[in-house]
């Protein structure tokens, strides 16, 4: 951005849920793309095979019958192993859902190793069948055609598939370990905290920068509409779902076009029903329908929450695993203690950082969007209250919570001390004065 060091530069650097990212998010997209490339290769390779013979070493040297046998064997083996990989994936998803929480299923489905493995197995199957149709004649006939390089490539795809299968087995066996699941969730949460709450996001300029933010020092409650501004409520017309991401740059552009300020009325991760209000727009005139649709489409809705911008969802998943571990049917306080350690790490990353300004300004320094992100207090309450409630009868949990809160208090900035003290008092009230 052309704006100097400011709240707007930090805020607009938020990860965006672009169409390209949404395109590649479903589990089936990458395997289908690999299969499409394999189909094109299966059609193209036999046509250019003659020009490659002699340039590629160790090519297939058998006749038409041998080529058909080899390709048929590869195709049959690949489709059989594909069914095995799919079955193992389904079993792992069931185990993860019942043992930990259903909300971590997208984490397993987003594994590129699993997607690439399924893609290469199906691609090898499709490629072998496609190349087989190009084999002509028999061993005793004169007019025969055997695409030697294309068949050799089928064998190479088998070797790649074997490598993918070994990586898949290693990934599956490690991904169902609680330590790996907790660590991955923690890493994702910490990475998102670093993006949403940068350590240097203050009202003062960074070292070497002579500028300061025009809006960084403007708190949320100090902003008010200009006298005579026209109010427009933007609602979800015919959509429903969970707010997975907000396209802040698009909102800034839309507000700039009509010289308006957009106050966002929903939180990330909040469920929206048809007709629910997204935002309030204060402009000099009434918005036209196209501008309203643009603002509405800046709020991305989905069937479930995501970690694109919603840092609270990382805490939610960790807390859910801890609650499941503390249930009487499982009774695994050690896993809950691991969760507290990971929450401690994330909160410690956050407790010493100033809350970013809710005001988002344009390149010219004009206030365009107002939206408050999740506060430290809300994240602390989410991390502490439910675990303290379900773990109050455990010997480990109250002790670990107090250790975490005492450490957070030592490194907290003054504005967060009261929230930590209140959390400590709630833990004592739930677990008893002796903890």
Image (cartoon, helix red, strand yellow):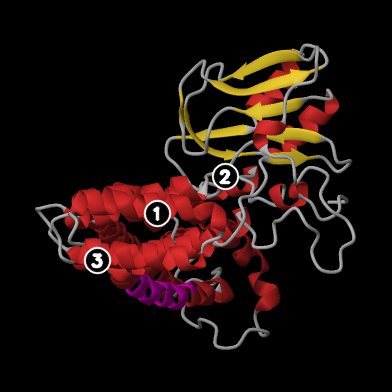
Q: Where residue 243 appears, x then y in whole percent?
A: 51, 35
Q: Badge 2 is on which residue?
A: 22
Quick one: label 2, few (<14), some, or many (20+) residues within 10 Å?
few
| x and y percentages locating residue 212 in the rendered image | 84, 53
Say above or below: 153 vs 376. below
At a point 69% along the width and 62% down the height, the residue shown is: 200
What's the CA distance linking mark 1 and mark 3?
Answer: 15 Å
Q: Residue furthest left?
A: 329
Q: Which residue is mark 3?
A: 399
Which of pointers 1 and 3 indicates the residue nearer the eye? Answer: 1
Res 122 seen here: yes
Q: Which residues are magenta?
A: 157-172
- Closer to the eye: label 1 or 2: 1
Asked whether, in this view, residue 138 is left or right of residue 399, the answer is: right
Give the number of the disc on residue 33.
none
Q: Nearer the viewer, mark 3 or mark 2?
A: 3
Assess whether residue 159 is covered by the magenta stretch: yes
Dot 3: within a 10 Å radius of its alpha carbon, few (fewer than 14), some, or many (20 or more) residues? some
Asked whether residue 432 is drawn in magenta, I would say: no
Q: Main secondary structure of the magenta part?
A: helix
Q: Earlier in the sequence, mark 3 or mark 2?
A: 2
Q: Nearer the viewer, residue 26 or 265?
A: 265
Residue beneath disc 1: 421
Q: Secondary structure at mark 2?
A: helix
Q: Is residue 217 left or right of residue 300?
A: right
Mark 3 falls on what kind of element?
helix
In the rendered image, is residue 90 in sight?
A: no
Q: Nearer the viewer, residue 38 or 163?
A: 163
The residues tagged by marks 1 and 2 sit, at their Cα atoms, a distance apart of 41 Å
């Amino acid at each position: 951005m052309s704006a100097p060091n400011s709240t707007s530069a930090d805020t607009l650097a938020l990860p965006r849920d672009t169409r390209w990212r949404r395109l590649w998010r479903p589990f089936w997209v990458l395997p289908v793309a690999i299969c499409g490339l394999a189909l094109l290769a299966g059609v193209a390779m036999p046509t250019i095979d003659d020009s490659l013979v002699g340039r590629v070493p160790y090519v297939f040297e058998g006749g038409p019958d041998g080529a058909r046998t080899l390709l048929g064997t590869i195709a049959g083996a690949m489709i059989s192993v594909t069914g095995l990989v799919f079955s193992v994936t389904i079993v792992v998803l069931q185990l993860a859902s019942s043992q930990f929480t259903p909300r971590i299923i997208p984490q397993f489905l987003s594994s590129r190793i699993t997607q690439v493995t399924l893609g290469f197995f199906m691609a090898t199957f499709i490629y072998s069948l496609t190349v087989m149709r190009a084999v002509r004649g028999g061993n005793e006939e004169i007019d025969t055609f055997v695409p030697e390089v294309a068949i050799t490539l089928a064998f190479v795809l088998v070797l790649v598939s074997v490598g993918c299968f070994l990586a898949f087995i290693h990934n599956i066996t490690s991904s169902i370990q609680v330590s790996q699941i907790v660590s991955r969730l923690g890493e994702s949460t910490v990475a998102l905290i670093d993006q949403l709450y940068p350590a240097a996001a203050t009202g003062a300029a960074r070292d070497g920068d002579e500028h300061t933010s025009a809006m960084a020092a403007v708190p949320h409650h100090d902003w008010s509409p200009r006298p005579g501004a026209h109010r427009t409520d933007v609602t979800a017309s015919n959509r429903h779902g969970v707010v997975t991401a907000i396209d802040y740059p698009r909102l800034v552009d839309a507000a700039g076009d009509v010289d308006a300020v957009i106050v966002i009325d929903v939180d990330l991760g909040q469920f929206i029903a048809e007709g629910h209000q997204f935002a309030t727009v204060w402009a000099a005139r009434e918005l036209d329908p196209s501008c309203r649709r643009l603002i509405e489409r800046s709020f991305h809705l989905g069937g479930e929450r995501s970690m694109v911008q919603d840092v609270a969802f990382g805490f939610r998943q960790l807390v859910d695993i801890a609650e499941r571990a503390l249930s009487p049917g499982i009774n695994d306080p050690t896993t809950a203690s691991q969760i507290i350690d990971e929450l401690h790490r994330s909160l410690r990353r956050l407790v010493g950082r100033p809350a970013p300004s809710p005001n988002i300004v344009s390149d010219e320094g004009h206030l365009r969007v107002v939206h408050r992100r999740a506060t430290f207090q809300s994240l602390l309450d989410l991390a502490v209250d439910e675990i303290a409630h379900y773990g109050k009868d455990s010997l480990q949990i109250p002790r670990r919570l107090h250790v975490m809160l005492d450490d957070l208090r030592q490194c907290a900035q003054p504005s967060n001390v009261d929230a930590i003290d209140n959390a400590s008092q709630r833990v004592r009230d739930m677990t008893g004065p002796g903890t």
